[in-house]
Every structure is written in C-alpha cells, then in structure tokens.
Image (spheres, helix red, strand yellow):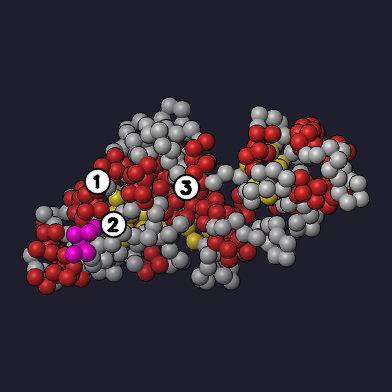
Amino acid sequence: MIVVAGSPSMLRSSSRHQAITKSWSKLWKQRTARRKVVEMSEQRDVTLPLAGIRVVEFAGLAPGPMAGMILADFGATVIRVDRPSVPPTVAPDVLCRGKRSIAIDSRVPAGRKALRRLVDSADVLIDPFRPCVMERMGLGPETFVGNEGSNKRLVYARLVGFTRIGRQKDMAGHDINYLASSGVLSLMPGDEKPMFPANLLGDFAGGGLTSALGILLALMERQRSGLGQVVNTDMVSGTRYVSTFLMLTHLYAPPPLSGERGKTTLDGGAPFYDVYTCADGRWMTVGCLEPQFFRVFLDKFLGVVPPKFTLSDGWRPTYETQADRSAWPLLKEYLKQGFRMHPRDFWTEVFHGTDACTVPVLSLSEAAASTPSSTPSSTPLLIPTPHPHLGRTPSVALRDVSPQDVKRTTELIRGQHTEEVLSELGLTDEEKRELMRDGALGKDCARL
C-alpha cells in the first residue's frame, strides 16, 4: 500500500507533521461528506457514448477543464494530473465533475516515468499549457504519437491562447486578449468602446468546446485509421471560427446587417433587437426581427401603454417604422419610456405565448426553475446539466445529485485518487516506494 502525502496514515507515522493534521482533518471530513457524490460521478454506465475512453487532463483553468468535463459528463474516465501539495488542498478548478486526481511531480524522474506510463494507457491527453511546456517535461507529442512514439493511438489535444505561429505565440494572455486578437471584439456592441461577454467566447466557445469537438473528431477518425493525432486548438482561431456568421455578415451582407459597430441589426443598433429596463429595474429582451413578429410585438405593446402615450413631438410607431432606419432612434426612445411604465413580470405576461419574440431576462435561480431537470429533487439545480441531451444514451452526470450536493461536484482535492490510479497502472510496491523516495508524490512523502 502506498501512503500519499498528507493522508491520515502518513500523518500518524511522524510527529513532525502534527501541524498538518488539523488542516488534513478538515479536508478529510469534506472528502467523506462528498464520498457519495464522487462515487456516483465515477460510475460509468457502459451505454454512455464515451464509456471506455480514458483521458489524462493536465490541470489548468477554464478551457482545458471544460473540455475534460464534457468528456467526463458523457462517460469518459478522466484523470486530472495535479502538482503535489501539502496538506492536500482543493484545487481552484470548479470544472472537475466526474474526474479523479493524481498528484505527481513531473520534474522528478520517477514521477515523469509514472506519467508516461499513465499517458501510454490513455486514449486522450489534454495539454492546457503554453507552447513547449510539455516538451520540457519530456511529455511532448513526439514521445507518444511520433514515429517512435509509445502510444500511436493517443489523441493529443493541445490548447493555447494565441496562435501557435506568430508574434504573440509566447505571450501570456486571457480571454479578453484572445478576443481582441481575433478581431471579434471590434464588432461587439458598446457606446464608447466594445463590451466583452465575460470570458465565454474565448475561453469556452473558442477554447474548451472547440477542443472537445476536435477530440471527438480525432477519436472518430481513429476508428478508421487506428492512429491518434495532435489536435491543436488556440482560442484566437477558435473564437474566429465560432464567429463565422458574425464576420461574414459584417464583411458581405448589406446594411443594416452590416455597418458601423453599434448601429447594425444584431449589435444593439436596431430598437427591435435590444434589452429594455422595466419599472422595477429588471429587464426584457426584444428580438422581433421579422416584420410579422414586429407587428405582433407592436400590437401587444401599444395595447398596454396609455392610448395617448407619444414622444414630445407627438410621434408614435407604426408597422412601417421597422423598415425606416431614420426612425430607429425615435422607436428606441419610445420603447425605452414605455417599458419603464410597468415591472418586468407585467411585461412577461403581456408577451407570453405570443410570437412577439419578447421574453424576460431571468436570474440564475429563475432560469433553473424554468428549465426541465432530470434530477429527482423537486428543488431545481442552479448549475447547468450536460447538453446536448441524447435520447438513447443521455449523460447521467447529475442524475442523482441533490441541490445540497451540487457544490461538492465542484471540489476535487489534489491527489485524492493517487494511490488508486497508481494501482490501476499496475505499479509494483518497489516502484511506488521509488516515487516516494524521489519526492514525486510530494516532499513530505520523500522524507518518510
């Protein structure tokens, strides 16, 4: 049996670690409390689409973990590789649902050897690091899928921010920088400057989701060729790809679909495609682009505002207003004043069940309550369930998780499954002792 750094057995074996005991005890209680959730998440129904696929995900934040979580949600066995920490701590990554963690130091020869063995047994590797980091660890693509590689069936997924070729390839960055370099940020709405959509577009649409798509495509191709391959994803190119419609429209479509930022149909320039503040400070979305939907919207809107409600010059909208771009500023002001006459829920009832394309902006709890759930609890889960829903082999990642257990699905202690994973790899007792002696499982483990 191997004793992982920070485990209760190891702490009792040496009085030098009494200071660690209190911290470990707290984490051990957390681990025990979430045991049920972990056990459920580790059960892999053989009918799931990715059952039998083994994934090694090197720990990162946002896009890499998102790709790994998608694979885990649909049946893959995902092992996250963490750096050892003493005492073991919960990693900041919240996208750890359905994963296990092995904490091992790749800088130590014995640790690097064990990691090579782990990757040799895998179908997919997710590399979230900047260029050449994995090569410096001796774990680059050539080691596994090159001409002399040890695992030619491996899908080696690499995920970086900037493009791998170009002036920015070695620079640090975040979602907002990748969005800027993609050209897409220049098309975003905003008064004095373009506004960015949190970190959704670069990190997750252009990064995590695109990487997961590439992995699935490579796995499908492997069924034909029997070979793995490198899947390169960068968030600049991924963002551009998912924004293809926006870019093509801007470049080639006639106005008002194209034109100056903030003045086109889909970026807030059109009053019939915008967000409006209501009397209670909450919001309604209006998206009646088509003339027939605009007519429904206008009939409903004019039916509840005062009959004599007009702008200062007596202006009032008609069906023809939608096609008259010169009247758009007047229509926007009219709708802005009109929506402020009533609270959001009033407007919700006015437009509900119609083709006005007008719905309320929901809070997270409201959205959860209005979304059909596959969980047994009558209390809705605030977090999203896996999507898309497969009719015959749906994800079961959150099937039996109660609202009280949701937070525990976002917590994974570094190295929580080290001993378990090493045993699955078939390491001998001597190989495990070598890992401990070399400090590959943490410095404290090496001193025992």
56 or 294, which lies in front? Answer: 294
- Position of 157 with respect to 23 (left or right) is right
* Residue type marked 2: Ile
- Residue receiving disc 3: 212
Q: Are marks 1 and 3 in contact (CB under 8 Å)?
A: no
User: Vertically, is 136 above or below 92?
Assistant: below
Which quadrant is home to the N terminus? bottom left
- Position of 186 with respect to 333 (left or right) is left
- Residue receiving disc 1: 35
Which type of secondary structure does the marked residue at label 2 adopt?
Answer: loop
From mark 2 to mark 3, how far is it between C-alphas?
Answer: 24 Å
Find residue 285 and report its image quarter. Answer: top right
Report x, y in % for residue 443. Answer: 20, 71
The residue depicted at 86 percent of the width and 40 percent of the height is 308
Which type of secondary structure does the marked residue at label 3 adopt?
Answer: helix
Q: Are marks 2 and 3 in contact (CB under 8 Å)?
A: no
From mark 2 to mark 1, how far is it between C-alphas?
Answer: 12 Å
440 or 140, which lies in front? Answer: 440
Residue 26 visible in the current orientation = yes
- Position of 85 with respect to 245 (left or right) is left
Find residue 182 and report its image quarter. Answer: bottom right
* Comes first in the chain, label 2 or label 3: 3
The residue depicted at 69 percent of the width and 43 percent of the height is 342
93 or 324, which lies in front? Answer: 324
Q: Which residues are magenta?
A: 22-27
Which type of secondary structure does the marked residue at label 1 adopt?
Answer: helix
Q: Per the image, is 26 magenta?
A: yes
Near mark 3 (Cα within 10 A), the count class, few <14, some 14-19 or many ≥20, is: many
Task: Tell me the tag on residue 188.
Answer: none
